[in-house]
Amino acid sequence: MAIVNPSGHELEKRFDKALTYLEDRISDLPNDVLISILSRLPLVGVAETGILSHRWRYLWRFTSNLDFDKMSTLCDIRFGLSSNSIEFERKKFVNWVNQVLELHQASTIDAFRVCFDLDGFDVSGWLDRKRVKMLQLNFTHCGQWYYSGNRYALRTNVLTKHRLDSLTCLCLKFVEVTGKVVEEILLKCPNLEALSVVESESLKNLKVPGPLLKLKRLEIRCCRQMTHIEISAINLVSLIYCGPWPSICFSNVPRLVEVSLMSGAAYFLVNNAFCYSAYLSVLEKLVLHLESVGYFRFPRFPVLGNLKHLELMLDAWQVNTLFGSASLLLEAPLLHTFVLKLWRNEKVAGTWPKRRKPRYKHQSFKVLEFCGFSGCDVDIALAVFIAGHAVLLEKMIIDPRNPELLEDCWGWDGWGWNYPEDYRRWQHPEDYRKDVEAARCHARQLEDKLPPQVQLVIL
């Protein structure tokens, strides 16, 4: 077969044709489309798109997403991975926010997030510039353990300067806020659908006044001085509470179907479940984090007649506690998904009773998620035991990672990073990976122990 080399003129024609396909078609899009694209990019790099062309130079100033998040910098400082001081990074962060807000021109913001250790810096001037739909202030500190330094306090005089009618979601972490301020926020934000307050020492009494037709999700975590909560929200769907059990009064919550309780509140509910049986009977999702209460036996529970999703996080050091978690399935006849998370700081005590057999076959339970699986004999026996309860079990998901590392580790536990597990993960990453991989290998033993219809998924 003869090979024909194209002439120079032919090559030039082919090159011109190829250039037509390399034409900048993105810049031909309308401005609102380009701005929508830029709003989905990390804020750090959005301004750099101005070098692409003259038309792109100022588009970033109209983006609808302002995400000032430098938590990775805090992480580097805390674990000694950065030579810069927190004071240097704090000044740098404040200058960055000031410069962006000075140039930004959009009148309405879909999401405005500020996440850094600002040591009580007054951010009020940042809040009165825009109409915001989602506002998150996360001033998690860089220090170790419990934080007693300066914190920014959100006060009522600040609220009077802002237009809050557009706010649909408000999240405050490590921000001092009183019950009076929260109540005023709720009254001034008719479109607020989600409210979260995490780590506020000033929040002691909270009244969620009715009717609040839009509020659907309420989260209160690690507010250690909390003594009383009164809730009247006709469309409230989800409640998350972490901390000591306060006096709680539900006056009008007909749509409350998702409840997540952690720490002392979870322990209180487990031991006083029958006092709240009217609320428990309508729940579709129940999450109980009991990892900080040590060993206990699950008491008898009222029937959870509408429950579809159950999640338990437990200390893994006592076999009887684990067996109690499995017996709780008997009280949820419509349960579809059971998530079991095990927190470990030592080896599991005891051995699994070899002759223990399920007394009852569950008729709707289909998915088991086992997080914190270490691969020890007790874990294997527990997974097999729970599978033995379920006639229709379809899938078992095994996740050997520590469940606390999968949580919102910047703030949910009250001080930021979980110690010592996170420290171990950062300082000894190879040991951590070896433990996880060993657990995955042990999990494969379940392939021959589970019913044939059960799909085993090892993450």
Image (tube, grey):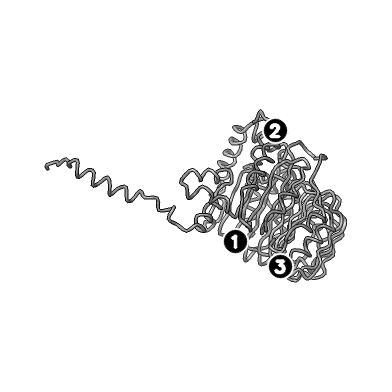
Query: Looking at the picture, how far across and down is residue 298, in whole percent?
Result: 78, 55
Question: Which residue sits at x=65%, y=47%?
Answer: 102
The answer for how far apart the CA atoms under marks 2 and 3 are is 42 Å
Nearest-to-viewer mark from 1 and 3: 3
Where residue 77 appears, x then y in whole percent? 68, 33
In space, the residues marked 1 and 3 are separated at their CA atoms by 34 Å
User: Vertical placement of 345 versus 195: above or below?
Assistant: above
Q: Secondary structure at mark 1?
A: loop
Q: Residue sitting at 70 percent across and 42 percent down?
A: 116
Around disc 3, counting alpha carbons within 10 Å, would you say few (fewer than 14), some (14 to 19), or many (20 or more)? some
Decide: few, some or many residues near mark 1? Use Cα within 10 Å; few <14, some 14-19, many ≥20: some
Q: Disc 3 marks which residue?
A: 214
| Label whose residue precedes the other's in the sequence (2 or 3) | 2
Hey, what amino acid is under mark 3?
Answer: Lys
Q: Which mark is residue 90?
A: none
- Is the C-beta separation of discs 2 and 3 under 8 Å? no
In the rendered structure, which disc, 1 or 3, sits on the residue that comes first in sequence?
A: 3
Question: Quarter-wise, where is residue 93 in the image?
Answer: top right
- Which residue matches tag 2? 88
1 relative to 115 in the view: left or right: left
Q: Which residue is mark 1?
A: 366
**Foreground tag (1 vs 2):** 2
Kind of residue sitting beneath label 2: Phe
Name the foreground residue: 139 vs 270.
Answer: 139
Nearest to viewer (mark 2 / mark 3): 2
